[in-house]
Image (cartoon, rainbow, N blue to C red):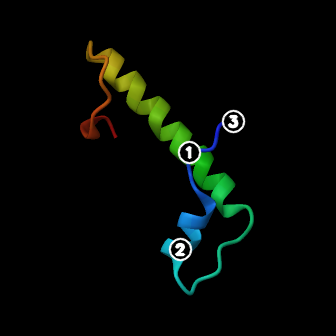
Amino acid sequence: MRMVIVRSRVKELAGDVNVASDFVDALERKVEQLVKEAMSRAKANNRRTVMAKDL
């Protein structure tokens, strides 16, 4: 799996809250799922461009 999420940015965003070691991996899987679902919706609507409305 290619990483889309940057671990250091997640930790930066979390601020003073600790980030568990498995959190970024789970977030990565969730993002991948969202992108795949958006791609399917775009294709179903005869588009080759994924848009915010596909989320």
- Image location (x, y in percent) of residue 40: 41, 22
Quadrant of the frame with the C terminus:
top left
Viewed as shown, does residue 15 lie left or right of 50? right
Q: CA distance from mark 2 to mark 3?
A: 23 Å
Give the amino acid type for the residue marked by disc 1 in the picture: Val
Label 1 residue SS: loop
Image vertical order of residue 31 relative to residue 7, above or below: above
Give the amino acid type for the residue marked by disc 2 in the picture: Glu
From the viewer's side, name the closer residue of 10 and 22.
10
Quadrant of the frame with the N terminus:
top right
Image vertical order of residue 20 relative to residue 52, above or below: below
Residue in the picture at 27% in, 17% down: 47
**Mark 2 / mark 3, whichever is N-terminal:** 3
Image vertical order of residue 20 relative to residue 46, above or below: below
Viewed as shown, does residue 42 lie left or right of 5? left
Q: CA distance from mark 3 to mark 1?
A: 9 Å
Give the amino acid type for the residue marked by disc 3 in the picture: Met
- Image location (x, y in percent) of residue 25: 68, 53
- Image location (x, y in percent) of residue 38: 39, 32
What residue does disc 2 label?
Answer: 12
Q: Are marks 2 and 1 in contact (CB under 8 Å)?
A: no
What residue does disc 1 label?
Answer: 4
What residue does disc 3 label?
Answer: 1
Q: CA distance from mark 2 to mark 1?
A: 16 Å
Viewed as shown, does residue 29 lie left or right of 53? right
Residue in the picture at 27% in, 34% down: 51
Residue in the picture at 59% in, 54% down: 27
Q: Which mark is residue 35?
A: none
**Mark 2 / mark 1, whichever is N-terminal:** 1
